[in-house]
Amino acid sequence: MERHFDEELKNLKELLLKMSILVEKAINYSIKALVERKTKLAEKVIKSDNSINMMEIEIDDFCHMLLALRQPAAIDLRFITAAMKINNDLERIGDQAVNIAERTREIIKEPLLKPLIDIPLMATLAKKMIKDSIDALVNKDESLARDICKRDDKVDDLNNQIFRELLTYMMQDPKTITRAVELILVGRHLERIADHATNISEEVIYFLSGKTIMHHMEDIKKQQ
Amino acid sequence: MNDTKIDVINFNFYYSGEKALNNVTISIQQNMVTGIIGPSGCGKSTFLRCLNRMNDVISGIKVEGEVLLDNEDIYASNVDVVKIRRQIGMVFQKSNPFPKSIFDNVAYGLTINGIRDKNYIVEKVEKSLKDAALWDEVKDRLNKSAFDLSGGQQQRLCIARALAVEPEVLLMDEPASALDPKATLKIEELIQELKKKYTIIIVTHNMQQAARISDFTAFFMMGELIEYDTTSKIFTTPSMKVTEDYITGRFG
């Protein structure tokens, strides 16, 4: 039986989809600004964060309305609580894109320390994780969501690699420290973005199956 | 806690050859509220009435399996049915006070059980009315007709009447479905108080009510117990798809 409520849940899904598109765009532009050394593009990311913030409020209000008026249970309840957390994760990803844009403004004032290879690669992986996590939500694809959680390790490895490499620069020549730290921070922001995408996937799994997988709960339960 | 008060084992119930309950097995926990939910005609009221042999009065019924109250089968041949119904009281959907005074309504169960001690009866009536959260509203007019009370008050009077004979289990068949939200809230609050002393089993059509007041929820469909678990599990992550579909209003 199609319920009127299903229409509202569909609207909520569409809002999350819209927000994820804004967020992906923010990451795209912030990395493009860094690679192509465009201050204006970085400024654009910083300015446009407000629309992501407004959207977070809109989604939150909508979820509160649904909880209060529809008193959802089971899969409906899990979807709405997951949506609230995903909403928060997306907003935080937007903040990380702003952080990257702010770093970019500083980085492009000076010559590049080294060619950018791993950072754009990290950005590509992280963006794909976000896109897939929202696809998993929309298409109710639990196995895709589980796959995303595994991909997080690859992003972590790249982040560590960037850190180690830039450490050697700093040790050889202390004058490179400022520029190296800025790049390390960009890596760190991208790593956080991938973490948020992982959180989203964990929420999707809870929504679909009722299973809690965050903080390695499945492994802990198996051991018990 | 977590002691079993009523153990229903492989229970079947037939109305003139028609199977109304199919192989129901469930352990009702002591001092807990167990909510029974399910679509109309799923057998939830039938099940409730089996727990104190209220169905016995219907001709052509057949019962198989066991209903153990504190490990004693209430369907055993040597059982005193009147005693069972004293131990397992019942409150119905429509409040049904007797055409008597408020006092006599509550005292009724005591007097028909042969109690003549006036002081004892007065004490017991007051205590029952207090337990049913009605005392303060009626203490100055105990001799007035029960029909002078509001719907919600009448229902609490019926609860007081059930409590007067000191039951151990209270069966409630949609006790608040005919009441306004305020009176409903009062009954729900009362149930939370009552479970400290009694084991409560409540049939309700109102899903939110089951979610609010019960500790355990049993979902029935077509005479079968589909799923039985803690209320929080049933309403957040039920195991069966059909349970999920029912409590999210996709059918029923």
Image (tube, coloured by chain):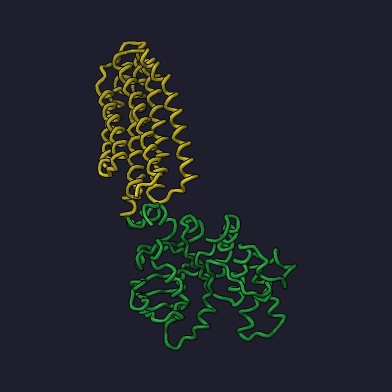
Image quarter for residue A204? top left
Q: Residue at x 43, y 19 (%)?
A: A47
Rendered view: A173 above or below B189: above
**Percent position of residue B217, x then y:** 43, 62
**Percent position of residue A14, x then y:** 36, 34
Rendered view: A151 above or below B91: above
Q: Residue at x 26, y 27 (%)?
A: A124
- Camera-side residue of B128 and B184: B184
- Camera-side residue of B232 and B12: B12
Rendered view: A53 above or below A216: above
Q: How many marks?
A: 0
Direction right: furthest residue? B140
Please name the color used to draw chain A.
yellow
- Camera-side residue of B237 and A116: B237
Direction bottom: furthest residue? B78
**Percent position of residue B171, x then y:** 50, 70
**Percent position of residue B38, x then y:** 40, 62
Q: Residue at x 35, y 54 (%)?
A: B245
Chain letter for green?
B
- Camera-side residue of A211 and B146: B146
Residue A156 shows up from this direction: no
Image quarter for residue B179? bottom right
Left or right, A155 with respect to B220, comes to left
Q: Residue at x 26, y 36 (%)?
A: A151
**Can you say which quadrant of the picture contains the C terminus of chain A?**
bottom left
Residue A82 shows up from this direction: yes
